[in-house]
Every structure is written in C-alpha cells, then in structure tokens.
Amino acid sequence: MTIAVTFFTRLRGLLGRRPEEFSTGEGLWIFPSKGVHALGMRFAIDAVYLDRNYRVVHCECGLRPGRLGAVCKRAAGVLELPAGTVVSSQTQVGDLVVFGGAGELR
C-alpha cells in the first residue's frame, strides 16, 4: 500500500498508473482528504472514506474514470482500492480498518 500525505502526492494520487499496476492487494491511503476524483484516470476504483479513528464513514464503489467522488465532511482520509474490493471484502459503514506493519493493510 502507498501513502499520499504531501500536497503533490495527494493531488497526483493514481494518475498515470495503468490498470495492471493497481490490482488486488494494492491500495492508496490519501491523508488528509475528504473526497477524491477519478479525473484523468484510466480505470475505476473503490474509495473507502475513513474518519480519524479509521472507521468507515462512506464507500464509493466503482468510481469510474472522469467522475467525482463524494465529499464527506466526517472523513479524515480516503483509501483508494481496486474496483470490486469493497464488495468482495464486504466492507461497510462502521467497519474499522486496521493498517499493519510496513504499510500493510489487514
């Protein structure tokens, strides 16, 4: 998993990446952030909005290229994941996301 915490890394996000470079097990944690976009992207993503305690406060499934995601006031950051991850992991509002050692998501 990659972490985007500077202005530039948050702004760039996943831009320029190809779909095959962002597959199951990959993720981008954008912090701080209250919303994301897929403008200029080449593939759809799932966006999981987390509060400051890493609780899921909103999910955007299959955010397609060229689209804007929701802006969520309660979010402290957004976890961008390969499309289909939210459904396959059964992630829902209220879930706690735990980040493991070395940036690994558990």
Image (cartoon, helix red, strand yellow):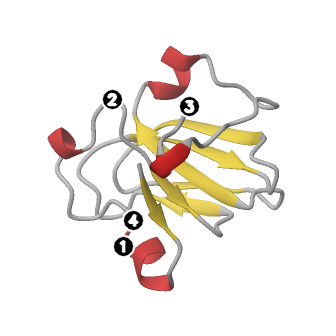
User: Which amino acid does the dot numbered 3 rest on?
Assistant: Arg
Left or right of 65 in this view: 97: right
In front: mark 3 or mark 4?
3
Mark 2 neighbour class, 10 Å CA radius: few under 14, some 14 to 19, many 20 or more = few
Residue carrying label 2: 24
Establish if 56 lies above or below 88.
below
Mark 1 neighbour class, 10 Å CA radius: few under 14, some 14 to 19, many 20 or more = few
**Residue 87 screen position, x and y as percent:** 53, 19
**Quick one: SS at disc 4?**
loop
In front: mark 2 or mark 3?
3
Left or right of 26 in this view: 7: right
**Residues at circles 4 and 1 in contact by the CB criterion of under 8 Å:** yes
Q: Earlier in the sequence, mark 2 or mark 4?
A: 4
Residue carrying label 3: 106
Which residue does the image show at 64% across and 67% down from the upper left? 33
**Residue 51 screen position, x and y as percent:** 79, 52
Residue carrying label 1: 12
Which residue does the image show at 81% across and 61% down from the upper left? 73
- Gap between marks 3 and 4 measured at Cα: 21 Å
Which residue does the image show at 46% across and 26% down from the upper left? 85
User: Which amino acid does the dot numbered 2 rest on?
Assistant: Thr
User: Which amino acid does the dot numbered 1 rest on?
Assistant: Arg
Q: Earlier in the sequence, mark 2 or mark 1?
A: 1
Q: Earlier in the sequence, mark 3 or mark 4?
A: 4
- Gap between marks 2 and 1 measured at Cα: 21 Å
Residue carrying label 4: 13
Establish if 11 lies above or below 34.
below
Q: Earlier in the sequence, mark 2 or mark 3?
A: 2
User: Which amino acid does the dot numbered 4 rest on?
Assistant: Gly
